[in-house]
Image (cartoon, rainbow, N blue to C red):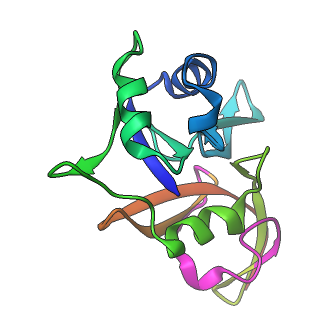
């Protein structure tokens, strides 16, 4: 089951690496930082970078959350397995399916998508958002992002992912 681990924002990958090094491998099937590719402009040139999809969080796949929590408590950095009143809450099947739909094991990165606007309607032509236009809440053409709304651990969260509009027709 996938569980969410809260870590220091900006140290997601370092925390994931530390978990991989210091936590008994029998407790982990996978530890990853879901990431997204986004574009930004620097000196009149567009560059693509990867950033955490959920800043301040790492996802671990484990069947032993109690032992995992004890192992995380022994780490030198902050890493807290999220719970509600002492009960560990795994991501539900829909949440896992959403992440799996956009990423794959070994490459947990939501790649950039490309789209065209035709008559005011956005049509995604390539990338992980193809066929998922209904999930797009809004588009920020200046930042080259599409904002998706997800429900994670009972909370609605807006998640920007990379989207490049390559052509606009009226």
Q: Position of residue 89 (x, y in %)?
A: 34, 58
- 139 or 73: nearer the eye? 73
Residue 105 position (above or below residue 10) = below
- 62 or 40: nearer the eye? 62
- 75 or 57: nearer the eye? 75
Q: Position of residue 21 (x, y in %)?
A: 63, 17
Q: Residue at x 76, y 62 (%)?
A: 113
Q: Check residue 132 for magenta coloring.
A: yes
Q: Residue at x 48, y 57 (%)?
A: 159
Is 2 displayed left or right of 170 in the figure? left
Instruction: Give the total of numbered labels.
Output: 0
Residue positioned most to the right: 126
Report the quarter where the C terminus lies: bottom right
Is 34 displayed left or right of 106 in the figure? left
Is 140 displayed left or right of 56 in the figure? right
- What are the residue bounds of the magenta stretch? 124-143
Residue 92 position (above or below residue 63) = below
Q: Residue at x 62, y 35 (%)?
A: 26
Residue 167 position (above or below residue 6) = below
Q: Position of residue 98 (x, y in %)?
A: 59, 69
């Amino acid at each position: 089951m996938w569980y969410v681990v809260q870590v220091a924002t900006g140290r997601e990958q370092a925390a994931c690496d530390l978990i991989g090094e210091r936590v008994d491998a029998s407790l982990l099937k996978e530890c990853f930082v879901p990431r997204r590719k986004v574009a930004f402009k620097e000196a009149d040139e567009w560059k693509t970078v990867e950033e955490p999809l959920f800043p301040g969080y790492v996802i671990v796949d484990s069947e032993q959350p109690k032992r995992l929590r004890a192992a995380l408590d022994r780490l030198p950095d902050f890493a807290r397995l999220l719970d509600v009143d002492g009960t560990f809450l795994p991501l539900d099947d829909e949440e896992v399916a959403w992440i799996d739909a956009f990423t794959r094991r070994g490459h947990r990165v939501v790649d950039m998508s490309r789209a065209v606007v035709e008559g005011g309607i956005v049509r995604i032509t390539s990338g992980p958002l193809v066929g998922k236009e209904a999930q797009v809440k809004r588009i920020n053409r200046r930042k080259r992002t599409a904002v998706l709304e997800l429900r994670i651990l009972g909370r609605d969260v807006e998640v920007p992912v990379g989207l490049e509009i390559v052509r606009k027709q009226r």
